[in-house]
Image: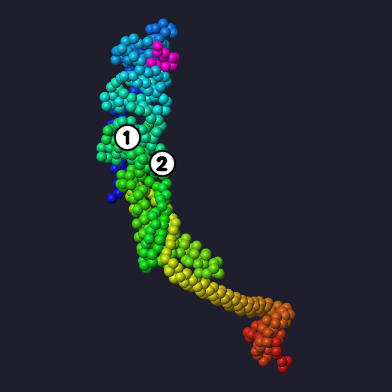
Amino acid sequence: MSINSTDIDGKLVSDYKKTFGQTIQHAGNDMHIRMDPNRSLYDELEQRGLLEHPRMPTGLGFNLIQDGQLGLAMFNRSPRFLAPGRYTFYSLFNHLISVVSITDKVITLGNIQIVTINQGELGLSLRNGESILLDPGRYILTAPHIFEKSTPANAQYIELGTYRRITVPVGFVAVAFDIGKQIIIRPEDTETGPFETNSPTFLFDKKTGFQSVQLQVRELDQLMVNTRDGVTIIAKGLITYRIHDPRIAFMTVQDIHGAVKRAAEATLTSLFLNAAIDEIAPSVPMKASEKDVTSVTSIVEESNFNQHIRTAFLHDFSYKVKQWGVELQDLNIEKLEFDNSVKDLLRKRAQARVETATSLANMRSQTDIAMQQAEREKQQAQIHAEAEAYVIRTKADADFYAAERHAQAAKVLQEVPLSAQIELKRLDVEMIKATGDRTTFLPMNLHIGDIGMIDKQNSKMYFATNNINST
């Protein structure tokens, strides 16, 4: 079952900070324990009634406290700090314990501690079991307020007693637990300030608590799988992914990176189990002399195989890990081996595929040639038919033109007899040229000069021929 990201709201972090962050005390503004930065250590101890000055005349005294030093002594079981000078102790109840530098980070005398927290550090003190943070500065603590330790303030994880402070770098998330709940702390949750808590039940593993959400490259274990047709292969892959939704990823699955790796191996095994050796193994080169042919085929088929496996893997695996808040990027097959006894079989199958491809190529070539020849013959027949049709159409147009001219000439001859005689002779020549060797039949009593005319007296039509006897 997938988890809706709206069910894992950022309020788990913000509300948690409101609950436990408000009880965290910082002593930066507590002037009862914090020294005035403009006042020297001697003046501060003098004001608090904790500093003793030398009572011996100058140059006399058994114990010397030099400038820049601080004497630690007990006066009748009460802690006293000694200013620079010479001191001699006559009472058994007063004695010098040690001499220290005023720049020492921690100076302890009885129930009093003088603590210096440098810039870039964070200190922790406890008062009646309560954690109190010490910001950079100098403090004078009196029991039961005691100093525990200090740590660099820019550390990603700070643990001081029950106090925890986490700063999440970009590209990571912090996974913690408290009150039975898992808390995912993202970089945006610490933009305005580090995540802080003093909850005594807060748990964070500084070794495994920071989880990367950047692009991950995981090498899969070597797989030994039997294919669908019973051939044993050895395969090894490499997956690339990233944590898309860290809240879902780390709250849904324990050890998300291990789970992704194991699930990827299972998916890849399933793909190999359902494939035949021909679908898995790339082509094996046949002979050295045939390198030019087989090497190209092998590279192409291996590329197709890798693409096939990659596509199937991404399709099947992406949907599964998406419910875990993981976005799958890629799969690479680094190693693919099979039994040597299979190589001969694969070589023969590869040779048969090459021969089949060659035969198909020859057949396609012959078919293309036949189709081109048929197309040329078709075009030639079409051109011939168009030429014949053009000749017939031209002759028909010539006959029509000649008949039309004859009709026009006949009309003119009816109206102008003299000009008709001249025109008739010209028409005789043109008609003979146009009709060739054709024969025209005339009535026996027809005169050659009256051809093509209608006699107005008897309304008879006269015809002419180019082969007329004088009889």
Q: Is residue 125 above or below residue 349?
A: above
Residue 385, image x, y percentages: 58, 78
Question: Tag 2: residue type?
Answer: Gly
User: Splitting the image into 4 quarters, where does residue 112 fall?
Assistant: top left
Mark 2 or mark 1, which is nearer the start of the sequence? 1
| Prevalent SS, magenta region | strand
Residue 153, image x, y percentages: 39, 30
Would you call the spot at circle 2 few (<14 residues within 10 Å), some (14-19), or many (20 or more)? Answer: some
Q: Residue lying at the far top in this picture: please name it.
A: 57
**Secondary structure category for the residue under label 2:** loop
Q: Residue at x 38, y 30 (%)?
A: 151
**Secondary structure category for the residue under label 1:** helix
Q: Is residue 420 above or below residue 155?
A: below
Q: Is residue 368 visible?
A: no
Label 1 or label 2, whichever lies nearer to me, is 2
Q: Residue at x 41, y 59 (%)?
A: 235
Asked which colour scheme the image uses, the reply is rainbow
Residue of label 2:
171
For the residue pair 319 and 201, the one nearer the viewer reads as 201
Q: Is residue 91 visible?
A: yes
Start and end of the magenta stretch? 62-71
For the residue pair 290 and 45, the one nearer the viewer reads as 45
Q: Is residue 303 magenta?
A: no
Q: Residue at x 50, y 67 (%)?
A: 285
Q: Is residue 394 above or below residue 178?
A: below
User: Splitting the image into 4 quarters, where does residue 394 fall?
Assistant: bottom right
Q: Which mark is residue 168?
A: none
Q: Quadrant of the C terminus?
A: bottom right
